[in-house]
Amino acid sequence: MGRMRFFTATVLFSILARSAFAADCPEWVQFDATIDNAADAPAGWFVFVKYDQDNEIMPGIYKSDNQDFNPQVIPNTESDEPLFVQATNDGEWLLYMVGDETALMTAFTAYLIKPDGTGKTEVPMPQCEVSGSGFSMPDLQFPRTAGIYRNSPLGSEIAYMASYQKMRAIEVDLSGDTPSFPNPGQGRLVIDLSNAGIRFAQNLGRGGAILALNGSHYQGAREHNSPYGQSNMFVTIPDNGEGTADGDDIWHYDDVPDNVRINGCGFSLSPTGDRAAWNIGRQGGDSSCFSCRIDDPSDVSYSTTQIDHKGFLVSHFMEPDEPSLGRTEYVLEKGISMNWVPRQFRFGKYNEVNWTDWNWPHEEYVVGILQGDLATQPGVWLCKWQTNEWFPIGDLAGTGTKARSPAIHISGIDRAKDVPLRYHRPREATGPASMYTARGELVHTAAARKLPRGVYVVKSGGRVTTKLVP
């Protein structure tokens, strides 16, 4: 009982302390969060994969209505144990992968299938290697993970990790009843880190989907070969995404030595690819404004005072020619929104009350999952990030199961297919409400009546929102 009182007191102190700091936080930090009924979520459907209480994958891809949770296994997936699932921009196709993470020399297999279970087709992933990390990871037969290439410059492509250092993509035609592949034996090289001294730190076992690849932009975790250290990276693929990125195409922090581990995960990019939504690690420094691991090198236990994985940061995607910044400086200067989860879930270690697997498929909405031994309402959650409204669309409380890798389709909302923009947070507002272009230029009132297509930023009453003109 004494330990429980201490734990509760620690949690309450952490929450109150963070609330006390709110006045000193950037105006885009959203401490206030509301929970709305799932019935009020936007119409459509979502899919996810399930794990049991022993953390074993359950067979099948589950699909449910956004407003009425009634998950059903998609036909022709009943015998598969999917590592993840994704949906194409138009919601016409799903991508998922199966594989045994303990079979190090056996490649994983990816499939495309329609949401009704028809058209199931294996995805060829050629030119993969047996690759060793050179430091902390075992040799593996690739591919071990894959993902839908959003807004691919070639139309439609499936990306996959061909080694610890190489990402490839294969073109696919999705116009028929079954997918076809114009060049099934050729996977173009999208990113090559062979000479960069780093490797992808993607989860190459369970749930390691490539989510944050859009147009000419990729965000993901990186590991240094030796000495070991881990952080996140922003990669710009040359020639508007048609070239091959290498170590010269990565934006770097200026205060993260090779042997420092600052983490970062749950990466996803906006529909236009110009912003990121993700779980920051130690990027937030010692600030109580952000859901992060407090920057205290002496704390190796990640105790309950480390309130990370309790929300996501929306931030500017960094191009390699932009000035380098410190990790905390980046958050403060390039942050757009810090979306804290509802207050009753802001406690516990990151793996005890764990909000992650973010997926940003529509401009207004980010979908993710809540899991962990102390999570009281686990399942799939949808966030309207501009106002920080949360919808428990897939409530798994009391089922002994947990969700991973959600993908959502919202009826009547087309995903943006614009060329990724260089996004900058707006400058000082000049009135009650001000609108800016994606480059931070003020839009005058007269011009706001007829805007060219793109993403615009509105700053009003201390809140930053976005406006998408299709």
Image (tube, rainbow, N blue to C red):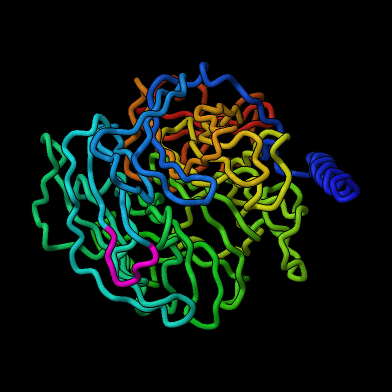
Question: What is the span of residues highlighted in magenta in the rendered image?
Answer: 101-108
Q: Is residue 332 visible?
A: no
Furthest toward the left, the residue is: 182
| Magenta-colored segment: predominant secondary structure | loop
Relative image position of residue 144 (x, y in whole percent): 33, 62
18 sits left or right of 198 in the view: right
Please tell me which residue lies in front, 27 or 264: 264
Which corner quadrant of the image does residue 396 belong to?
A: top right
Position of residue 185 relative to residue 395, above or below, is: below
Relative image position of residue 413 (x, y in whole percent): 36, 24
Q: Is residue 35 visible?
A: yes
Position of residue 320 relative to residue 408, above or below, is: below
Relative image position of residue 15 (x, y in whole percent): 80, 42
374 sits left or right of 135 in the view: right
Please tell me which residue lies in front, 403 or 42: 403
Please tell me which residue lies in front, 224 or 336: 224
Point 52% across, 41% down: residue: 402
Point 61% across, 25% down: residue: 433
Picture quarter with the N terminus: top right
Point 27% across, 65% down: residue: 107
Which corner quadrant of the image does residue 426 belong to?
A: top right
Please tell me which residue lies in front, 256 or 27: 256
